[in-house]
Image (cartoon, grey):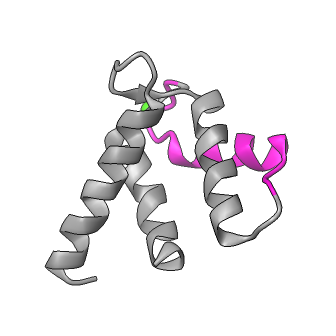
């Protein structure tokens, strides 16, 4: 990924993160990740993730195990889907 792309990806990730972080505490809950994943799956024409998929994905991304996704955890995920979305 080029620097320009990286900046664009980071900006998009930030916009999505902020729009789903409903109480603006800088953290995303599992229920909010579910909404994001549903939205991305629809965009990609994929079947919606099951609760099991979401639980597994969330656990993998939540590196500090606080049951919340901080932006630095979320961007790891977004980087993986960014190429598929463009
Ligand atoms: Ca976390």
Q: Is residue 85 above or below residue 52?
A: below
Q: How many marks?
A: 0
Asked if residue 27 shows in the view, the reply is: yes
Residue 56 in the image: state x and y as whole percent. 71, 47
Q: Determine if the magenta segment contains residue 79.
A: no
Residue under the image location 51 percent in, 39 percent down:
62
Residue under the image location 65 percent in, 29 percent down:
31
The quadrant of the picture occupied by the N terminus is bottom left
| Extreme residue in the bottom direction | 2
| Extreme residue in the left direction | 3
Residue 14 in the image: state x and y as whole percent. 31, 46
Residue under the image location 45 percent in, 59 percent down:
78
Q: For residue 64, what is the image quadrant?
A: top left
Residue 59 in the image: state x and y as whole percent. 62, 41
Q: For residue 4, what is the image quadrant?
A: bottom left
Q: Is residue 79 left or right of residue 40?
A: left
Q: Is residue 69 above or below residue 79?
A: above
Give the residues drawn in magenta, as a range. Answer: 48-66
Residue 46 in the image: state x and y as whole percent. 77, 68
Asked if residue 70 shows in the view, the reply is: no
Residue under the image location 33 percent in, 26 percent down:
26
Q: Is residue 66 left or right of residue 34?
A: left
Q: Quadrant of ligand 1?
A: top left
User: In this orientation, which residue lies closer to the viewer: 86 or 72?
Assistant: 86
Q: Determine if the magenta segment contains residue 51.
A: yes
């Amino acid at each position: 990924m080029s620097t320009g792309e990286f900046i664009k990806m980071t900006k998009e990730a930030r916009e999505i993160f902020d729009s789903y972080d409903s109480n603006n505490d800088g953290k995303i809950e599992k229920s909010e990740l579910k909404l994001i994943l549903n939205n991305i799956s629809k965009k990609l024409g994929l079947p919606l993730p099951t609760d099991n998929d979401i639980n597994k994905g969330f656990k993998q991304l939540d590196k500090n195990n606080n049951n919340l996704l901080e932006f630095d955890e979320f961007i790891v995920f977004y980087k993986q889907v960014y190429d598929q979305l463009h």
